[in-house]
Amino acid sequence: MLFARGLLYLSLLGVGLRAFSEQKSHWPRHRGDSALNGNSGQKIGSSLKLEWVFDAGEFLKSSVVVYEGVAFVGADTGIIHAVDVETGKEKWQYKTGLGIEAPPLVHEGTVYIGSTDGFLYALDAGNGKLKWKYETDGEIMGAANQANRPKSKDSVIVVGSYDNFVHCVDAKNGKVIWKFETQNYVNGVPTIYDDKHVVFGGCDSVLYVVNLENGTLGRSVEVEAPIAASVAVGDGVGYVGNMDRAVMAFDLETGKVVWNYRNKSFPYFSSPGLTEKHVLIGGRDKGLHCIKRISGKLEWRFAARGRIDSSPVIAEDKVVFGSMDGKIYLVSLQDGKEISSYEVGEAISSTPALAGGRIFVGCEDGKVYAFSTGRQK
């Protein structure tokens, strides 16, 4: 059954990649799509040439997203910045109550971003004016996700909070539709599965599958340790790393463990990227792990000089990610060999954004770096 669903997923993934190619000038979500696969469907060159640097002024963990020629990023100052992708010049800014670590989400002309002040903000993407804000009772550390409820058909925003809840609110007015309570903090981005379910884990060491329409529990699975990142979903299987040295694959229909990958005794704070055949994830063992998607066996491991909390992004035959060693890397998807790297000098824990053949990444020195990648072969 799993194999049959796998064949169907490979077909659907091909359609998804074509859709990405058609929209390659945008990267409006933290991991590229609502299933958080981290797969851009883009083809980029083999070099890294710095085009511009934007100074956000403080420590920066929020990842960049790109929409209609503008890069959006949050900063520890509590400011969300909108930056022109061609010039690196700021177009507007909006200040929240406290620092921002969550990546933004852009959907239909609105920027949605959570802050450690506990609010989810909806801003006009063109001018930064506040449309509405929704209050949770805890810090928001992960990006929001957007979906359309299967029966009601309304557009909703789903976000986790340190108040132990996942919140679903109306995208137009911020009114709460449902809340789902867990037993501890929710760090990562809620994943949309099959346009019907919300999948997420948190610090209570449980993986949840919740009904998108009404927020009722569909299934919960006890996992080995707290989950600090997000779940990538494909073929009815959820893939996630945990803080107890394992990357796990779960059948979301049955709750059974498909495989359990252990390589070294270090935790995973990176979110997985998916291809047709592989799962890619960074580890605190300073390695980028390429795991066979069906068997859970190691294909290759790339060794950096610092831990890899940055979540990898796939660009056809290449993988892009940052490291705490202060470098942004391009490595070959085929064999894990380094193609190119650029040292910015300070730790990179955020996830790169790919749009229009460029790479945009935030660094813990408080700056956003934009790179061109040379000729695309």
Image (tube, rainbow, N blue to C red):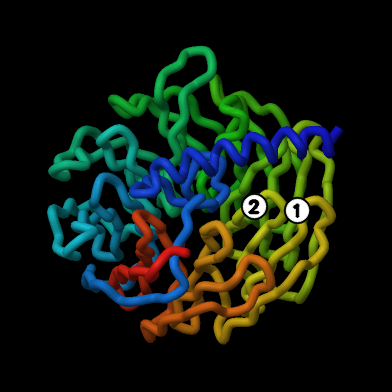
The residue under label 2 is which amino acid type? Thr
Residue shown at 33%/42% (left/top)? 106
Q: Is residue 165 visible?
A: no
Residue shown at 23%/72% (left/top)? 52
Between 53 and 239, the one lying in front of the other is: 53
Residue 262 percent location from the top left of the image: 80, 67
Residue 314 percent location from the top left of the image: 54, 58
The residues bearing labels 1 and 2 have C-alpha atoms spaced at a distance of: 8 Å
The residue under label 1 is which amino acid type? Arg
Q: Is residue 89 left or right of residue 59?
A: left
Residue carrying label 2: 275
Residue carrying label 1: 293
Q: Are marks 1 and 2 in contact (CB under 8 Å)?
A: yes
Residue shown at 76%/50% (left/top)? 249
| 9 in relation to 318, above or below | above
Q: Which mark is residue 314?
A: none
Q: Is residue 257 left or right of residue 134?
A: right
The picture quadrant where one finds residue 219 is top right
Helix or strand or loop: what does disc 2 sit on? Answer: loop
Residue 43 percent location from the top left of the image: 48, 58
Helix or strand or loop: what does disc 1 sit on? Answer: loop
| 129 in relation to 61, above or below | above
